[in-house]
Amino acid sequence: MTVEMNEHDEPAQLDIAKLTIKLTETPKPLLDVNKLQFGANFSDHMAITSFHPASGWSPPEIKPYAPLTLDPSSSCFQYGGNVFEGLKAYLGPDGKARLFRPDMNMRRLERSVARLALPGYSLYIRPTIIATRPALGITASDHAILYILASPSAPFFQRPISLLAVTNAVRAWPGGTGGDKFSGNYSPGFLPQREAVARGYDQVLWLFGEKKWVTEGGAMNVFVVLRRADTGLDVITPPLDGTILPGVTRASCLALLSDPSFYPDTTLFPIERGFTIADLKRWSADDTLLEVLCVGTAVIVGAVHRIGFEGRDIEVPTYASEDPNGLGPVGRALRGRILAVQEGRETYKGWGVVCE
């Protein structure tokens, strides 16, 4: 992919008007939706464009899904200069596809690209930008490839999950990249995740610092629902302090929880505040803890039923008799409203963006 230019031209901007489309000659058969696995199946096509410091962005292409060919010295291999996003498209009852709050994903992608000093622009849809400077040397890449994959996927975790709280590994730290959708944030967590599964847990609960602050559950944001001493419910999630990814689902949950019409039977008090594993133990012991939720694009809203810490489990109420996913009343309401907007059955503040 090249762009012709003379010595007086500015590097080309990304121009959707120059998009070319080449369709596959061997389309795959449609998959049984009941047999889909998250991230295991991909559409027949992908979108791709590349950036060169001299010529700028190449004309974008939609072409058959295929491997990429890269120089072995590319920055993405040597220094991990990769960022990505994850969003979903849903087919509504009107037959139209909808994206859920894609503007938030694009703003977060812009922040991630800026954090790594990459040249950047902006169905489980996975936009990815990789650093492709063909040389060794610890410096920001001035070459990049942007590509977009689409993967028909089943819901993630259709049951209550268990978390193992870990203190011997850290997902993110102040001043680092934990608040960006940076590939390097994820692979260091694979070993703790494997160890958690070996001990009978589904995911890791990431703790930070001497006080063991709760940060994220696997790659998901965490919420807790607590009974208040007076009336109503506190719904607490850790604040965005640079170690927490600003999730689109997280922001959507906070917006709904702040809307008095969302949960009219009980007053909800959404709070962005830090809490520790000791707080979780205390809340569980005194029956204050009503729900622990993990939220994210893949899972939407998932219930946590136990948390392992220092050889013992912190028990969390579950509601399997009331909900197939084990969600309590608040989690059930959040998941139901978000899914209704994603699927086009309801509208809310322009969150569902029709693809036309």
Image: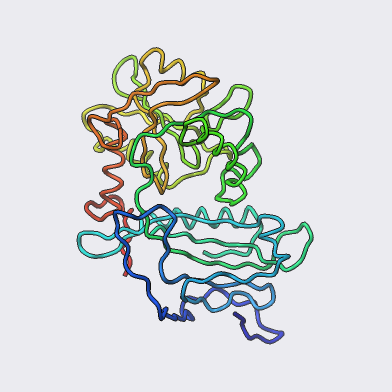
- Quadrant (top left, top right, bottom left, bottom right) of the N terminus: bottom right
Residue 350 relative to residue 133: left or right: left
Q: Residue at x 34, y 14 (%)?
A: 229
| Residue 138 in the image, given as x and y percentages of width and height | 77, 57
Front residue of 263 and 32: 32
Residue 8 is left or right of residue 304, and the answer is right
Look at the picture and state if 227 lies above or below 68: above
Residue at the far top in the pictured view: 286
Taking the view exactly as shown, the residue that stands out farthest to the front is: 198
- At 48% across and 58% down in the image, what residue appears? 106
Quadrant in which the C terminus is drawn: bottom left
Mark count: 0
287 w.r.t. 40: above or below:
above
Spot occupied by residue 333 in the image (x, y as percentages of width and height) = 27, 37
Q: Please say which color scheme the image uses.
A: rainbow
Q: Is residue 89 left or right of residue 10?
A: left
Give the percent coordinates (x, y) of residue 280.
46, 21
User: At which x and y percent is residue 270?
Assistant: 38, 31
Q: Residue at x 49, y 25 (%)?
A: 308
- Classify residue 348 as left or right of residue 63: left
Quadrant of res 150? bottom left
